[in-house]
Image (cartoon, grey):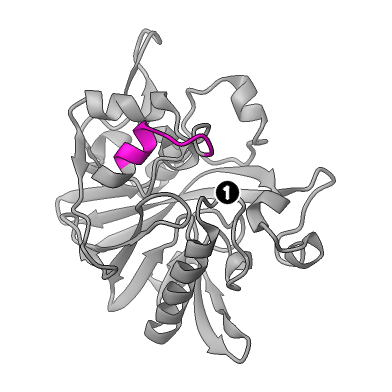
Amino acid sequence: MKIYSIETVKFKLDGGAMFGVVPKSIWQKTNPADSNNLIDMSIRCMLIEDNNRLILIDTGLGNKQSEKFYSHYFLHGDFSLDKSLKKAGFHRDDITDVFLTHLHFDHCGGSIQFNKDKIGFEPAFKNAHFWSNQNHWKWATEPNKRERASFLKENINPIQESGQLKFVDIPTSDMLKKSALGFDILFVDGHTEKQMIPHIQYQDKTIVYAADLLPTVGHIPLPYVMGYDTRPLLTLDEKEKFMNLAAENEYYIFFEHDPVNELCTVEKTEKGVRLKQIYTLNEVFN
Protein backbone atom coordinates (compact mmCIF):
# COMPACT_ATOMS: atom_id res chain seq x y z
CA MET A 1 0.00 0.00 0.00
CA LYS A 2 1.02 3.59 -0.65
CA ILE A 3 -0.76 6.82 0.27
CA TYR A 4 -0.56 10.16 -1.54
CA SER A 5 -1.71 13.64 -0.58
CA ILE A 6 -3.76 15.14 -3.43
CA GLU A 7 -4.03 18.92 -3.28
CA THR A 8 -6.89 20.25 -5.41
CA VAL A 9 -7.33 23.95 -4.58
CA LYS A 10 -7.15 26.55 -1.86
CA PHE A 11 -10.17 28.72 -1.13
CA LYS A 12 -11.59 31.06 1.51
CA LEU A 13 -14.49 30.82 3.94
CA ASP A 14 -15.91 33.10 6.59
CA GLY A 15 -13.91 32.61 9.78
CA GLY A 16 -16.88 33.15 12.06
CA ALA A 17 -18.85 30.42 10.30
CA MET A 18 -15.89 28.07 10.57
CA PHE A 19 -15.56 28.52 14.34
CA GLY A 20 -19.14 28.99 15.51
CA VAL A 21 -19.40 30.50 19.00
CA VAL A 22 -15.63 30.90 19.49
CA PRO A 23 -14.66 34.60 19.37
CA LYS A 24 -12.50 35.87 16.54
CA SER A 25 -9.94 37.18 19.04
CA ILE A 26 -9.22 33.54 19.89
CA TRP A 27 -9.55 31.63 16.62
CA GLN A 28 -7.57 34.13 14.56
CA LYS A 29 -4.44 33.11 16.48
CA THR A 30 -4.39 29.82 14.58
CA ASN A 31 -6.44 30.78 11.51
CA PRO A 32 -5.76 34.44 10.68
CA ALA A 33 -8.47 36.28 8.75
CA ASP A 34 -8.19 38.88 6.02
CA SER A 35 -9.95 42.26 6.02
CA ASN A 36 -13.19 40.56 4.96
CA ASN A 37 -13.06 38.08 7.84
CA LEU A 38 -12.18 35.26 5.42
CA ILE A 39 -9.72 32.52 6.32
CA ASP A 40 -7.63 30.34 4.01
CA MET A 41 -8.79 26.78 3.52
CA SER A 42 -7.56 23.81 1.52
CA ILE A 43 -9.29 20.92 -0.21
CA ARG A 44 -6.80 18.10 0.19
CA CYS A 45 -7.89 14.67 -0.97
CA MET A 46 -6.17 11.35 -0.33
CA LEU A 47 -5.16 8.67 -2.81
CA ILE A 48 -4.63 5.08 -1.66
CA GLU A 49 -2.76 2.67 -3.90
CA ASP A 50 -3.52 -0.83 -2.62
CA ASN A 51 -2.78 -3.82 -4.86
CA ASN A 52 -5.15 -3.55 -7.83
CA ARG A 53 -7.18 -0.74 -6.28
CA LEU A 54 -6.60 2.99 -6.56
CA ILE A 55 -8.92 4.70 -4.11
CA LEU A 56 -9.55 8.46 -4.09
CA ILE A 57 -11.07 9.90 -0.93
CA ASP A 58 -13.19 12.95 -1.80
CA THR A 59 -12.87 14.86 -5.06
CA GLY A 60 -12.92 18.59 -4.25
CA LEU A 61 -14.97 21.34 -5.88
CA GLY A 62 -14.67 20.30 -9.52
CA ASN A 63 -14.83 22.83 -12.35
CA LYS A 64 -18.38 22.75 -13.72
CA GLN A 65 -20.02 25.42 -11.55
CA SER A 66 -20.53 28.99 -12.74
CA GLU A 67 -17.98 31.76 -12.41
CA LYS A 68 -20.37 33.48 -9.99
CA PHE A 69 -20.49 30.37 -7.81
CA TYR A 70 -16.71 30.09 -7.58
CA SER A 71 -16.34 33.83 -6.94
CA HIS A 72 -17.89 33.34 -3.49
CA TYR A 73 -14.97 31.13 -2.47
CA PHE A 74 -11.95 33.03 -3.81
CA LEU A 75 -10.16 30.04 -5.33
CA HIS A 76 -6.38 30.29 -5.46
CA GLY A 77 -3.20 28.22 -5.53
CA ASP A 78 -1.40 26.39 -8.32
CA PHE A 79 -3.13 23.08 -7.67
CA SER A 80 -5.71 20.92 -9.36
CA LEU A 81 -6.92 17.38 -8.97
CA ASP A 82 -5.45 16.36 -12.32
CA LYS A 83 -2.09 18.03 -11.65
CA SER A 84 -1.79 16.29 -8.28
CA LEU A 85 -2.78 12.92 -9.70
CA LYS A 86 -0.20 13.34 -12.46
CA LYS A 87 2.47 14.27 -9.91
CA ALA A 88 1.69 10.99 -8.13
CA GLY A 89 2.00 9.16 -11.43
CA PHE A 90 -1.68 8.58 -12.19
CA HIS A 91 -4.60 9.72 -14.33
CA ARG A 92 -8.23 9.98 -13.27
CA ASP A 93 -9.03 7.00 -15.53
CA ASP A 94 -6.80 4.88 -13.26
CA ILE A 95 -9.07 5.44 -10.25
CA THR A 96 -10.99 2.28 -9.33
CA ASP A 97 -12.93 3.67 -6.35
CA VAL A 98 -14.06 7.11 -5.23
CA PHE A 99 -14.94 7.22 -1.54
CA LEU A 100 -17.06 10.25 -0.61
CA THR A 101 -16.98 11.18 3.08
CA HIS A 102 -20.19 13.14 2.45
CA LEU A 103 -21.91 14.92 -0.41
CA HIS A 104 -21.38 18.61 0.34
CA PHE A 105 -20.18 20.31 -2.83
CA ASP A 106 -16.61 20.89 -1.64
CA HIS A 107 -16.19 17.15 -1.04
CA CYS A 108 -17.90 15.64 -4.08
CA GLY A 109 -18.01 18.36 -6.77
CA GLY A 110 -15.10 16.87 -8.67
CA SER A 111 -16.91 13.54 -9.04
CA ILE A 112 -19.02 14.79 -11.95
CA GLN A 113 -18.03 16.80 -15.02
CA PHE A 114 -19.69 18.15 -18.15
CA ASN A 115 -20.04 15.67 -20.97
CA LYS A 116 -18.24 16.25 -24.26
CA ASP A 117 -20.97 18.50 -25.68
CA LYS A 118 -21.44 20.37 -22.38
CA ILE A 119 -25.18 19.74 -22.49
CA GLY A 120 -25.21 17.23 -19.63
CA PHE A 121 -23.09 15.57 -16.98
CA GLU A 122 -21.05 12.41 -16.62
CA PRO A 123 -18.76 10.81 -14.02
CA ALA A 124 -15.29 12.33 -13.97
CA PHE A 125 -13.90 8.88 -13.11
CA LYS A 126 -15.30 6.59 -15.77
CA ASN A 127 -13.75 3.40 -14.39
CA ALA A 128 -14.55 3.92 -10.72
CA HIS A 129 -17.21 2.87 -8.28
CA PHE A 130 -18.51 5.76 -6.15
CA TRP A 131 -19.04 4.90 -2.48
CA SER A 132 -21.55 6.55 -0.14
CA ASN A 133 -24.08 5.11 2.34
CA GLN A 134 -27.84 4.81 2.13
CA ASN A 135 -28.67 7.10 5.05
CA HIS A 136 -26.50 9.94 3.82
CA TRP A 137 -27.61 9.51 0.22
CA LYS A 138 -31.25 9.90 1.25
CA TRP A 139 -30.31 12.90 3.42
CA ALA A 140 -28.53 14.55 0.47
CA THR A 141 -31.15 13.80 -2.19
CA GLU A 142 -34.02 14.94 0.06
CA PRO A 143 -32.15 17.86 1.67
CA ASN A 144 -33.27 19.93 4.64
CA LYS A 145 -33.52 23.68 4.18
CA ARG A 146 -30.31 24.33 6.10
CA GLU A 147 -28.12 22.14 3.91
CA ARG A 148 -29.90 22.45 0.57
CA ALA A 149 -27.32 24.90 -0.80
CA SER A 150 -24.53 22.41 -0.05
CA PHE A 151 -26.17 19.42 -1.77
CA LEU A 152 -26.12 20.26 -5.49
CA LYS A 153 -28.16 17.94 -7.70
CA GLU A 154 -25.63 18.12 -10.54
CA ASN A 155 -22.97 16.69 -8.18
CA ILE A 156 -25.13 13.86 -6.89
CA ASN A 157 -27.83 12.59 -9.25
CA PRO A 158 -25.47 11.74 -12.17
CA ILE A 159 -23.55 9.36 -9.90
CA GLN A 160 -26.62 7.21 -9.41
CA GLU A 161 -27.72 7.57 -13.02
CA SER A 162 -24.34 6.25 -14.18
CA GLY A 163 -24.83 2.92 -12.43
CA GLN A 164 -21.48 3.38 -10.67
CA LEU A 165 -22.89 4.10 -7.20
CA LYS A 166 -22.31 1.67 -4.32
CA PHE A 167 -23.21 1.87 -0.64
CA VAL A 168 -21.12 0.77 2.33
CA ASP A 169 -22.87 -0.97 5.21
CA ILE A 170 -23.78 1.10 8.26
CA PRO A 171 -22.97 -0.43 11.67
CA THR A 172 -25.64 -0.93 14.31
CA SER A 173 -23.38 0.59 16.98
CA ASP A 174 -20.88 3.44 17.15
CA MET A 175 -18.00 1.05 16.58
CA LEU A 176 -15.72 1.31 13.57
CA LYS A 177 -17.05 -0.56 10.53
CA LYS A 178 -14.71 -2.46 8.21
CA SER A 179 -15.47 -1.43 4.62
CA ALA A 180 -15.27 -3.33 1.35
CA LEU A 181 -12.36 -1.02 0.49
CA GLY A 182 -10.18 -2.49 3.23
CA PHE A 183 -10.21 0.36 5.75
CA ASP A 184 -12.35 1.04 8.81
CA ILE A 185 -15.02 3.76 8.83
CA LEU A 186 -16.23 5.91 11.70
CA PHE A 187 -19.78 7.20 11.08
CA VAL A 188 -20.59 10.58 12.63
CA ASP A 189 -23.78 12.64 12.49
CA GLY A 190 -22.98 16.05 13.96
CA HIS A 191 -21.87 17.81 10.80
CA THR A 192 -24.29 16.00 8.52
CA GLU A 193 -26.08 12.64 8.56
CA LYS A 194 -23.67 9.69 8.45
CA GLN A 195 -20.48 11.45 7.43
CA MET A 196 -17.82 8.77 6.98
CA ILE A 197 -14.35 9.11 8.50
CA PRO A 198 -11.83 6.58 7.07
CA HIS A 199 -9.28 4.96 9.41
CA ILE A 200 -6.45 3.51 7.31
CA GLN A 201 -3.84 1.07 8.63
CA TYR A 202 -0.57 1.98 6.97
CA GLN A 203 2.97 0.97 7.95
CA ASP A 204 1.79 -0.12 11.43
CA LYS A 205 0.17 3.28 12.02
CA THR A 206 -3.39 4.58 11.79
CA ILE A 207 -4.08 7.53 9.50
CA VAL A 208 -7.49 9.14 9.91
CA TYR A 209 -8.91 11.26 7.10
CA ALA A 210 -10.66 13.81 9.29
CA ALA A 211 -12.91 15.47 6.64
CA ASP A 212 -15.30 17.85 8.43
CA LEU A 213 -15.14 16.22 11.85
CA LEU A 214 -11.90 18.15 12.37
CA PRO A 215 -11.35 20.69 9.56
CA THR A 216 -8.07 22.27 10.73
CA VAL A 217 -5.51 22.19 13.53
CA GLY A 218 -7.30 25.23 14.93
CA HIS A 219 -10.39 23.10 15.56
CA ILE A 220 -8.74 20.65 17.97
CA PRO A 221 -10.16 22.14 21.25
CA LEU A 222 -13.64 20.72 21.85
CA PRO A 223 -15.73 23.95 21.72
CA TYR A 224 -14.27 24.89 18.34
CA VAL A 225 -17.18 23.60 16.26
CA MET A 226 -18.25 24.90 12.86
CA GLY A 227 -21.39 26.97 12.45
CA TYR A 228 -22.09 24.73 9.43
CA ASP A 229 -22.72 21.67 11.62
CA THR A 230 -26.37 20.61 11.69
CA ARG A 231 -26.14 19.14 15.20
CA PRO A 232 -23.33 20.99 17.01
CA LEU A 233 -23.95 19.39 20.41
CA LEU A 234 -23.67 15.97 18.83
CA THR A 235 -20.45 17.08 17.12
CA LEU A 236 -19.06 17.94 20.55
CA ASP A 237 -19.78 14.43 21.81
CA GLU A 238 -18.45 12.72 18.68
CA LYS A 239 -15.38 14.92 18.60
CA GLU A 240 -14.57 14.28 22.27
CA LYS A 241 -14.71 10.51 21.79
CA PHE A 242 -12.62 10.70 18.65
CA MET A 243 -9.97 13.02 20.10
CA ASN A 244 -9.51 10.83 23.16
CA LEU A 245 -9.05 7.79 20.94
CA ALA A 246 -6.69 9.73 18.70
CA ALA A 247 -4.50 10.63 21.67
CA GLU A 248 -4.62 7.16 23.23
CA ASN A 249 -3.89 5.32 19.98
CA GLU A 250 -1.48 7.85 18.45
CA TYR A 251 -3.58 8.40 15.34
CA TYR A 252 -2.08 10.48 12.55
CA ILE A 253 -4.86 12.92 11.65
CA PHE A 254 -4.92 13.93 7.99
CA PHE A 255 -6.52 17.33 7.35
CA GLU A 256 -8.68 17.94 4.31
CA HIS A 257 -9.19 21.65 4.95
CA ASP A 258 -6.15 22.95 6.83
CA PRO A 259 -4.34 25.32 4.42
CA VAL A 260 -0.91 24.73 5.97
CA ASN A 261 -0.86 21.56 8.06
CA GLU A 262 -1.22 18.18 6.40
CA LEU A 263 -0.93 15.76 9.29
CA CYS A 264 -0.76 15.89 13.08
CA THR A 265 -0.80 13.87 16.28
CA VAL A 266 -2.50 14.91 19.52
CA GLU A 267 -1.97 14.26 23.22
CA LYS A 268 -3.90 14.55 26.46
CA THR A 269 -3.07 17.57 28.65
CA GLU A 270 -4.57 19.26 31.70
CA LYS A 271 -6.61 21.41 29.31
CA GLY A 272 -7.87 18.42 27.34
CA VAL A 273 -6.61 16.92 24.10
CA ARG A 274 -4.23 19.27 22.34
CA LEU A 275 -1.88 19.34 19.37
CA LYS A 276 1.26 17.26 19.84
CA GLN A 277 3.18 17.51 16.58
CA ILE A 278 2.72 18.61 12.95
CA TYR A 279 3.96 16.50 10.04
CA THR A 280 3.77 16.15 6.31
CA LEU A 281 2.73 12.78 4.92
CA ASN A 282 6.19 12.24 3.46
CA GLU A 283 7.90 12.94 6.79
CA VAL A 284 6.11 10.06 8.46
CA PHE A 285 5.59 7.68 5.54
CA ASN A 286 8.44 7.84 3.08
Tag 1 secondary structure: loop
In percent of width and height, residue 265 lies at: 49, 77
Q: Residue at x 63, y 36 (%)?
A: 75
In the rendered image, the vertical position of residue 227 relative to residue 63, given as above or below: below
In percent of width and height, residue 7 lies at: 49, 48
Decide if residue 98 is in sight here.
Answer: no
Residue 83 in magenta stretch: no
Q: Nearer the viewer, residue 31 or 188?
A: 188
Decide if residue 211 is in sight here.
Answer: yes
Residue 145 in magenta stretch: yes
Q: Residue at x 53, y 52 (%)?
A: 229
In percent of width and height, residue 177 lies at: 22, 64
User: Mark 1 — residue?
Assistant: 228
Q: How many marks?
A: 1
In the rendered image, the vertical position of residue 238 relative to residue 232, given as above or below: below
Check the picture and name the quadrant holding the N terminus.
bottom left
Q: Nearer the viewer, residue 2 or 232?
A: 232
In the rendered image, the vertical position of residue 62 relative to residue 198, given as above or below: above
Side of 189 where 231 appears, left or right: right
Q: Residue at x 59, y 61 (%)?
A: 225
Side of 68 where 91 appears, left or right: left
